[in-house]
Image: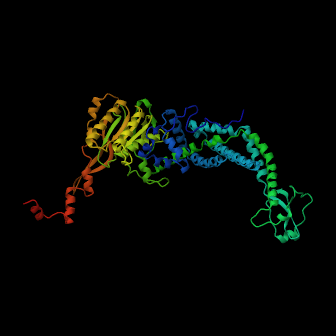
Amino acid sequence: MAYRNDFEDTSLLFPPGVPRPPRRLINAPNHTYNVKDLNIGDLVRTLSISGFYEARIEEILTTPIMDADILRYRHDIIDDLLRTPSLATQLESILQVIINLENYLVEPQWEESELRRVAWRLSELENYVDGVVKLNDLLTAVGDHLHSTGLRTLREKVNAIASHETFIRLRADLPEYSQKFRGIASITIGVNLDDELRPREAMLLNVNTTRFRGQSMLNWFFWRKPPANDDAPAGPLHRAPPDEMVMRFGQESPQMQTLFQDLEAVMNDIAKPISKALENYTTVNARMIVNLKVEIAFYLGAIKLIQHVRASGMPICRPDIAPMDTRNCELTDFYNIGLLLQQSTLNRPRDLSEMIITNDLRFDEDGRIFILTGPNRGGKTTYTVALGLVQVLFQAGLFVPAQSATMSPVDGIYTHFATVEDPRLEAGRLGEESIRLNKVFQYATRNSLILLNETFSSTSSVESVILCKDVVRVLRLMGARAIFATHLHELAADVDTINREIDGDSAVKSMVSQVDLEIDDEGERHRRTYKIVAGPPVGSSYAREIAARYGISYHKLTTMLRDRDVLPNESESSRVNGS
């Protein structure tokens, strides 16, 4: 059997024979906005075990996987790693071996130095053998605990490498080659001096396997035994012309230059037999193991995220996969994982179970387009972003922040959040919003997820309602899944009319961020619960209540101005009014 170890089809992200999806479906058309709106950056940094992996991790997160077989393939690997914690721990040490090995894949172009090429190749093969042996021992030791197709397939192929006669022979030969090559510890050079002790002649005497231990000048001249007869020079004699005999400080003498050139030639001659022997292993290519680097790092990051979430007192689960054409999503106790990561830094978790509010969500035939209203700062944006991040994690093949989840894949995630006006844009804020939204509809389909947050808030409320109703009508006509977080209660109040007027199988429903009514010494107050439930709009954003809490009400402002003696007193006010 020929030795084959490249295994280009070996991947922990994709099952053998499954086509790879095109990259970054999430970026069509507004990748930059989508990543920013959902704050994917925090998630990327958490999943990256070092900054080196961030670009690749973002690429994986922003390429939604629609194939259920690929998603299960990844979920199964995560289950294996969670079931056997030692496997993840030891994979981390193997990852460092792989990183070391990667440095040797591109051989530097060193003129014609056989010596350095052999040293480079020896180091590559040593790291390669080390990586294969450790990975094979680790996966073999796990035994029947491996259930995932990905890790079992990897174990079979790594074991095939480790048990092949070529690898066995390489593993046995390397220590001998390394000893012969790296066993050279010192070079003995003889230098003849003239009557004034100036260097006159130099020659290479010997190549030694032990380090030279120098003696003092007096020991050298007066007590050292003369060399044995078999200490014949290993290199030619070098003489300097009379006018170049004196060596100046910091300047090489010509005879020493020649000596080192000969030394390089001698060392190259020593390296040639080892170089010839290594030709037997030209088929050994470390690329297979190096190709696993990012994939192993991806799963190690996934495990650390799961452990961190659980240590923070919040649920995270393996999602069930529903067919794409059902366009369903059922989440129980899901939450914004970005909020968790902001409140609890990695490796320093704290219990957030009383702080982070969880919610439920259900996309099905009863409703796939939700108009979400409620009080300002009532959790509408947090809820909308939470869903986007759940879908991103789900379609990267990761566990999701929820108690339970059943989800259909989407073919794209599109966001349209209100932005600060950029004075450099000729179209103005409304024009810029319209351009971005138009691009969404150039790409979105009935299998897409569209997240809108305060869209068209840059114009008057009357105009906003008109524009937003048109958008919702189109969403219903398409059959897409969507959440539209808005302050426009009139839009939510018209959902029944929109459902009657427009045919489609994505029903529009109203959802609202709940508030609890509290009565205290100051009167009635509304407490935000951040719970999102189905229901009609409440008809108020509670803006006046928020303003009053911060001192913005008629009574509080007039009281403050009177206390500052800015307002006229009652008698002056009467005279002004003519009474």
From the viewer's perspective, tell me whether residue 125 is left or right of residue 553. right
Residue 256 image offset from top left, x and y in percent: 80, 60
Q: Residue furthest front?
A: 243
Q: How is the image coloured?
A: rainbow
From the viewer's perspective, tell me whether residue 110 is left or right of residue 569. right
Report if residue 140 is visible in the image: no
The vertical placement of 143 against 100, above or below, is above
The vertical placement of 543 against 211, above or below, is above
In the image, 200 versus 134, the foreground residue is: 200
Residue 549 image offset from top left, x and y in percent: 26, 56
Residue 344 image offset from top left, x and y in percent: 44, 53
Q: Residue furthest left?
A: 579
From the viewer's perspective, tell me whether residue 40 is left or right of residue 270. left
**Count of numbered circles in the view:** 0
* Quadrant of the snapshot with the N terminus: top right
Residue 80 image offset from top left, x and y in percent: 55, 41
